[in-house]
Image: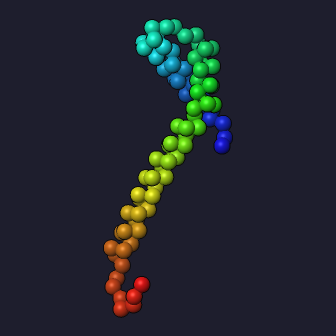
């Protein structure tokens, strides 16, 4: 699996959310560097779990759509005398 990385804009937005969370929920100020370090830690240690869950959700949606398409084929199939 490729390393989970964010572009500068995404990283800035996430770091801002981390800093806001610490201030709002923990009543603590966290420095920019510490917030970036925390983001890197979670990306490396926890990111794969979120990534895999996203893949699982996408796979489930795809399987449901494919089943729907397969059902649609059967619905438009013309009857014949042959058996399956």
In-image side of 45 versus 18 (left or right): right
Above or below, 20 against 13 in this view is above
Residue 53 in picture, x, y percent from top left: 50, 42
Q: Which quarter of the image is occupied by the C terminus?
A: bottom left
Please report the residue visible at 58 percent of the width from the left and 17 percent of the height from the top. 35
Can you name the residue that lies furthest to the right here? 2
In-image side of 50 versus 37 (left or right): left
Please report the residue visible at 41 percent of the width from the left and 63 percent of the height from the top. 67
Residue 25 in picture, x, y percent from top left: 42, 14
**Scheme of colours in the image:** rainbow
The answer to whether any part of residue 48 appears in the image is: yes
- Nearer-the-camera pick, 74 or 42: 42
- Nearer-the-camera pick, 3 or 84: 84
Residue 49 in picture, x, y percent from top left: 55, 38
The answer to whether any part of residue 9 appears in the image is: no
Above or below, 35 against 50 in this view is above
Q: How many marks?
A: 0
Can you name the residue that lies furthest to the bottom here? 81
Residue 1 in picture, x, y percent from top left: 66, 43
In-image side of 62 versus 78 (left or right): right
Above or below, 66 against 10 in this view is below
In the picture, residue 44 is in which quadrant? top right
């Amino acid at each position: 699996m490729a390393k989970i990385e964010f572009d500068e804009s995404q990283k800035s937005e996430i770091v801002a959310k981390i800093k806001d969370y610490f201030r709002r929920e923990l009543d603590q100020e966290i420095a920019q560097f510490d917030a970036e370090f925390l983001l890197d830690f979670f990306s490396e240690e926890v990111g794969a779990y979120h990534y895999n869950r996203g893949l699982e959700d996408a796979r489930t949606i795809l399987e449901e759509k494919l089943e729907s398409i397969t059902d649609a084929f059967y619905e438009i199939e013309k009857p014949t005398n042959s058996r399956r």
